[in-house]
Structure formats: C-alpha cells, structure tokens
Image (cartoon, rainbow, N blue to C red):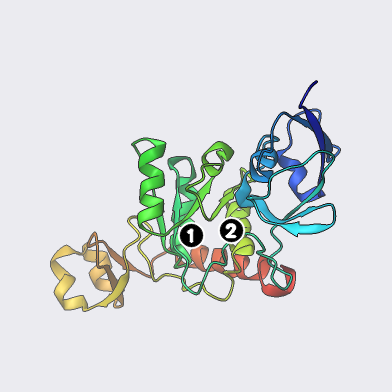
Amino acid sequence: MSDKFNVYLEFTPALRFFLHQGCKSGTVQKQLSHATSVKDVVESFGVPHTEVGKIKVNGETVGFGYHMSPGDRVTVSPVDPASFGGFGLQPEPGDNPAFIADEHLAKLVRRMRVLGLDTHLFSGGSDRDLLALMQNGNRILLTRDRRLLMHNIVRSGYCIRSSDVFQQVCEVVRRYCLAGRMQPFSRCPSCNGKLEVADKISLLNRLEPKTRRYYWNFFLCDSCGKIFWRGSHAEKLESFVAAVREGCNYSEL
C-alpha cells in the first residue's frame, strides 16, 4: 500500500513570478511521501520563503513549520507592507535596517547608499561567506538568486525582480517602507562609510585648483577618506532622490 498523498497549493498572483514553467496558473498539485514542512513544499515550486507573508492551510493561518497532511489545501500570499501586519511571516525591518547585496547588484548598492541606506556590497568569496556576513551583521539580503534566499539561515531577504536599476531601488524602498527613513547624501557611495562635514582649509592640499576656487562646502567619508562636494553631478543625483520619493511614497505602497 502506497504512503504517498497529494496536497494542493494556490499561489496568489504576486508570487506567480517565481513559479516554474507550467505552473503559471497559480494552482498546483504536489505528491508527497511523508509529512514535509509547508516551507519546503512552497520552495519546491521556486518561491523563496522570504517572499511569503501568509500561509493558510484549509483556511487556517499557519507558520513555515507546519507539516503537510493528505488533502491539505494551501493558499500562499506575498508580503504586503501596505496593509496592517503585512509583513506577516517576515521580520519587520525596524527603524534603521541594514542590507547586504551580492556582487551582481553593484549599481543598486551605490544608489541605495546615495539615499543614505546602509548597504554592504559582497564581492568575492562563497555563498557561505556572504551568508555569514549577512548573519553577523544582522543584514537583509538582496539578490536575484532565489536559491540563495532559500537557505534556512536567511531570516530576512528580498528577490530583486527588475533588471532596471531605478526600478530595483523602488522595489527595495517599497518592500521595506523606506521612503520616510532615507537620509540622502549621508553615506559614501563608494564604501558605505558615513559622510561628515569637513573644513575646507584642512583639505586644501587634496583639492584640484578649480575645486579650491569654486567650492566651499565639503564632506569627508569617515571610512575611506574620500572627499565630496556639490559638483556638476549634484542636480542629477537630487533629481534621482526626488524621483524615488515620488515613486515610492507611502500613499503608493
């Protein structure tokens, strides 16, 4: 006599992005041979647990540790930060969330730093090294590698959807409700250090002649020592910040 049994899952539309080819309708059947956790079953369809806000089994809300039984009918819903308690099964980001991104998201990282968001770029090393830095620094993982997000060690993370860097920034700001927490131009875009007001006189021997002549207000990175001032690129960066605020304000979440 076979011990195998079937369970049935419905993924709401926002999660169907992750489903394997042939499962795009959102309703799928899975045959199991033992009482597997609902987390493992959900992830077997390509949906990382970090993307799941709520799971209902036979109409009752459950956690990731729920073990499946024959005939269970499961509804899987995404994180919805716009609604009350919308993070659901995911940790809320807190007042000053810190992020870590893999090396494929270097452009996103630089722009998040422009917004004043604490973001570490991991480059070089193994997935294990990345996950260790994530855990030790209590950082939220940003990646396009869904397999990385499926590691049990990952408590909080987000799978970037878009290939456009501006849209990537907006995705993260919306997901973690960051529109009111940004502190633009407070971090070094190069190394993530904090920028501090610097005395021009103390920097004179490091400035080019035209910079000494035409600029008076300077900032110094407390980590790498790089100097910043409001140069010709400033208007472009300010327009970027304004566009993020406009596109990601709370009324549009």
Give the number of the mark in front: 2 or 1.
2
Q: Check the image and name the residue furthest to the top.
A: 1
Task: Tell which residue pokes out farthest to the front in this image.
Answer: 1
Displayed quadrant of residue 230? bottom left
**Is residue 238 shown above or below 154?**
below
Residue at (67, 63) in percent of width and height: 88
Question: Which residue position is annotated with label 1?
Answer: 112
Q: Amino acid at mark 1?
A: Met
In percent of width and height, residue 174 lies at 64, 63
Q: Position of residue 224 (x, y in %)?
A: 24, 59
Is residue 196 toward the left or the right of residue 245 in the image?
left
Location of residue 144 (image quadrant): top right
C-beta proximity under 8 Å, tags 2 and 1: yes
Is residue 13 rendered to the left or right of residue 97?
A: right
Q: Quadrant of the C terminus?
A: bottom right
Badge 2: residue crowd in 10 Å (few <14, some 14–19, many ≥20): some
Q: Nearer the viewer, residue 163 or 220?
A: 163
Badge 2 element: helix
Tell me residue 236's x, y (percent): 51, 63
Q: CA distance from mark 2 to mark 1?
A: 9 Å
Q: Position of residue 246 (x, y in %)?
A: 66, 70
N-terminal-most mark, 2 or 1: 1
The quadrant of the image that shows the N terminus is: top right
Which residue sits at x=17%, y=63%? Answer: 206
Residue occupied by mark 2: 172
